[in-house]
Every structure is written in C-alpha cells, then in structure tokens.
Image: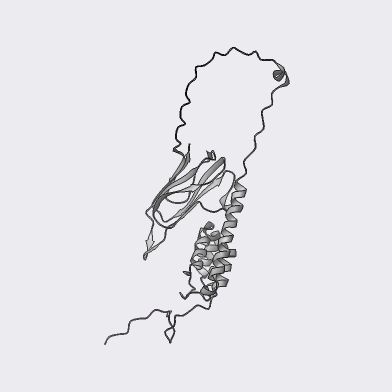
Amino acid sequence: MSQTPNLAPYPQADAYGQPQISSKSFLTTWLLSLLLGVLGVDRFYLGKVGTGILKLVTIGGLGIWALIDLILILTNKARDKQGLPLEGYDKHKKIALIVSAAFIVLSIIINAARGGSTPTTTPAVVPANEAAAPVAAAPVAAAPATQAAPAAAKTWTKVAELAGSADNASQTFALSGADARLVYTFTGGKELNGSSMALASIYLVEEGKDLTKDGGLPAKLLQKDESGETAVHKSKGSYYLDVKAANFDSWTISVEEKK
C-alpha cells in the first residue's frame, strides 16, 4: 500500500491558494538591520537566534555580514524562521532603498574625509651665517638649443602584493596620490546545495588605523570566484592591505599606481 509523501513543514500557500506572508514586518526588520545589524538584532527579530548570536559575537562579521543581510532585506530575499517573506515589502521598499542609499553614501563621505588629511612638512631652516654669505656666480657656457624629448607615457606599476587563502594583512607601503587600482584573483570558492559559502572583502587602510576599532567600508566585496580590478582613490600617504576571506582555496591581490 503506497504512502503519501511527507510534505514540507511550512506551507507557502493558505487554504485559498494565496501565498503566505510572515507576521514579521519588513519595515521593522530593515530598520533593525540598518541601525543595529552589526549586533544581530535583525536576526533575533526574525526568530533566527543561533545566527543572531553568531552575528553578535563577530560584530556583524566585521560589518560584511551586516551589509549582506541589509542587501537581502532590501531585495526581498530575507525570510523569517519559517521561510516566509516579510510583510509590507511592496509598501515600504521605495523609502527603504532611498534612505539606505543615502546612509551608505554619507558613510563613504565621512570615511573619505577622515582619511583625506595629509601631514604637513616643516620647511628647512638655513643658519643665518650661511644665508648671509655671498655666492660667487660661476660663468655658464651657453648650451646649444635642443628639442625637448616627449614625456614618457605612464604605465601601471606594482606597489604592493598580498596572497593567501584566509584572513591576511600586508606590511605598510606608500601611495603617491596618483591613479591607483586593486588587481585581484579569488579561486576555489566553496558551495553548499548550489549556494556560495565563500565571502571576502578587501580593505585599503591608512597606516595607524585599526579596522576592529575604527571600522571602514571595503574597497571590494566578493561572494564567489572572481578576477578583475577596481579603482581606488587615496591621497598621498602610507597604507596597508587587510583581507577578510573565508571558504576560498586561494587569492592574490596587488596594488598598482600609474607612474
């Protein structure tokens, strides 16, 4: 005698064939993720206590996990503990997208302003007795007129390089303030049931700053195997690379300037 197959524990439609909606509010979830996401409060609200605790103790995965959760909420991909979509997405999605974009842009501007200051140099002091001494002018032979050589075309020059398979940070290096870019390759990203488990972020940090204390936005965020380049805009000064990566076999990153 045949048996009826076991059905999914959480049906996605009610008795009238209408899709079920969670009792959890999209608006509340979004606000908690935007303002308190690094503490995992949004996941506690959705009933996901285990991942909420993990998100709390990792400070939102150093901000990366918090950003990913915010994106999932804004694109209506977030679900409550029963796997149901959040209530009120269509009603509030427009204002949520506008406010989130403004919040992120403001954060970028503030971080750029904090990292844009450069140290001033003190002019050399010439002793008075040396300044007063006359200097005899040596005769200068007239040089034949020559045509100026054309300026050489600028090319991308490697300034620093870093490689690994997990979290790693480089030694400090100097940037001149010229056009700069990151060239990166990440390979061997792990998957589970067709979904990527890999996650990585690349930070270009000013010397003297600590990501765990000062925070910061990544120059590049990845969730799968990828190779490419991304422009970075930094003023003259000393910097270091800080990479947070999980579930990749290997990665390499180089910093290049146009010289």
Q: Residue at x 62, y 49 (%)?
A: 113
Q: Nearer the viewer, residue 28 or 48?
A: 28
Is residue 64 depicted above or below 22 in this figure? above
x, y (%) of residue 228?
41, 49
x, y (%) of residue 77?
46, 69
Q: Residue at x 63, y 14 (%)?
A: 137
Q: Quadrant of residue 222?
A: bottom left
Q: Nearer the viewer, residue 11 or 13?
A: 13
The residue segment tinted magenta is 4-8
Residue 39 drawn in magenta? no
Q: Is residue 213 visible?
A: no
x, y (%) of residue 214?
60, 52
For residue 85, side relative to residue 28 (left or right): left
Q: Nearer the viewer, residue 189 or 145?
A: 145
Tell me the quarter of the image containing the N terminus: bottom left
Q: Nearer the viewer, residue 253 or 145?
A: 145
Q: Quadrant of residue 25?
A: bottom right
Q: Residue at x 53, y 63 (%)?
A: 55
Is residue 130 depicted above or below 176 in this figure? above
For residue 98, side relative to residue 164 (left or right): right
Q: Residue at x 47, y 24 (%)?
A: 147
Q: Which is the main secondary structure of the residues drawn in magenta?
A: loop
Residue furthest to the left in view is 1
